[in-house]
Image (spheres, helix red, strand yellow):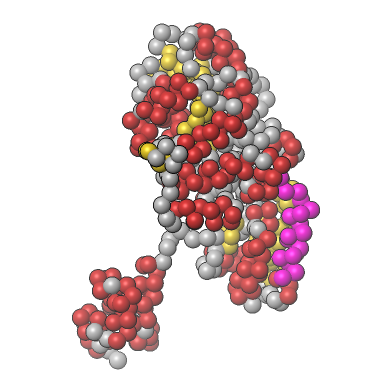
Amino acid sequence: MEKNELFRNIPKVDVLLERESMAALIGRYGRALVTEAVREETDRLRRIIQTEDEAAAQRALEGLEKAVEDRLAAMCAPRVRKVINATGTILHTNLGRAPISREQAQRLTDIVTGYSNLEYDLENARRGERYAHFEGLLCRLTGAEAAMVVNNNAAAVLLVLSTLAAGGEVLVSRGELVEIGGKFRIPDVCRQSGAGLREVGTTNKTHFSDYEEALTDETKALLKVHTSNYRIVGFTESVPASELAELAHSRGIPMIEDLGSGVLVDLEQYGLSHEPTVQESVRAGIDVVCFSGDKLLGGPQAGIIVGKKEYIARMKRHPLTRALRVDKFTVTALELVLLEYLRQETAAQNVPVLRMVSEKEPSVRARAEKLAALLRQRQLRADVTVTACQSQVGGGSLPLERLDSAAVTLDPWQMSADALERAMLALPVPIVPRVAEDKVLLDMRTVAEDELELTARMLGEVLA
């Protein structure tokens, strides 16, 4: 069949829309969307006829209606999907960072699928404040006088500086001018806030006298930034926040600390290196402390601000607060996670991030052996072994820390490891692994028990 004849066989859009199969699609997706899909598929068909052989063109012509249906399904499918994180990186920035528990998710569903008292005071039958749902919890957990939350920690730093230092200068050590990801840097945030940045000290050493000598009448605040996503080691020196707080208070200006990840429990109890807790900063006399909600805290994305009531009150009144405020999803999820911290004994099991951080290697290995057994039952075209590996916390937290872990290693017989990885990413529930030495590793620290059967079943289809 000649190309001209193939072109003539392409049905007109309005004719195709009158077919019975299209009527069913119109009922499901609406006429406008179906029309758009038909136009796109007929255009694609013309390109196939123009560039490919007759057999391919004929197949595409015969499969036109199915192609329209598939395109519509793809157009209407959600882009954000559940994935199985088999990388071993607990706070994987690209995979949504901290997961919340199923129990918390169910409670969240119950609240956000209807109405809630987000900004309604039920006791006094009047307008309330969304911060009221978690402010008391944060104060109880941290020892701070007041608290509020915005949509992420960069926003928290922006709001704090805009409120307390705009029009003046803020002193920061050169060794703390961090980039927090996506090329967002402390100097940029400071500039946007309207505060001038005055650097003190050097990259590796900053002394108390550096701050003293830099103080002027223009100084509105001192800022300490915890370098949670990197470490400077060797010939180094920095000034403790408590000493800086005393200096700031002697000049009648606030002391601010950006803790970054934000920790409410002592991680040393899990065998990890010490990470400054929010409670330590509050006890050290820091006036305003800000940190992330979706990192080591294990909650939703949020920028949490705790500190002295007078400063928090000023921030709540700042015009930026309206633009940066959190919605009902974040308010609900954050409250549920914070409630878990009231029971320190069970928080390590009920907060998924803490559970993964604190889990010992034998427990991870037992889960790896279980998945390996499920895979061997399916007689895959791959060698399946359990190997030792190391996980990381990720998300800009504890950069030097490595956790002993166990992985299910797949060595495929008839495809490369890269090809297997691509196939795993194309699964109905994508599995995101690590690839090393032409083998695929599934680090089981970040794979939950209730994901094992699904993981085995899908891998069985890929490697059958």
Going 52% across and 69% down the picture, which residue do you hit? 428
Residue 14 image point, x, y percent = 20, 81
Tell me which secondary structure the magenta stretch mostly adopts.
helix
Q: Is residue 225 visible?
A: no
The magenta segment: 357-374
Going 63% across and 63% down the picture, which residue do you hit? 451
Residue 288, magenta (yes or no): no
Residues 328 and 59: in front is 328
Going 76% across and 51% down the picture, which residue do you hit? 361
Toward which corner of the image does residue 365 lie, by quadrant?
bottom right
Residue 294 image point, x, y percent = 54, 43
Q: Is residue 287 left or right of residue 319?
A: right
Q: Is residue 80 left or right of residue 461?
A: left
Depicted 348 relative to depicted 107: above or below: above
Residue 106 image point, x, y percent = 54, 56
Q: Is residue 112 visible?
A: yes
Residues 225 and 414: in front is 225
Residue 56 image point, x, y percent = 38, 83
As drawn, the residue found furthest toward the front would be: 124
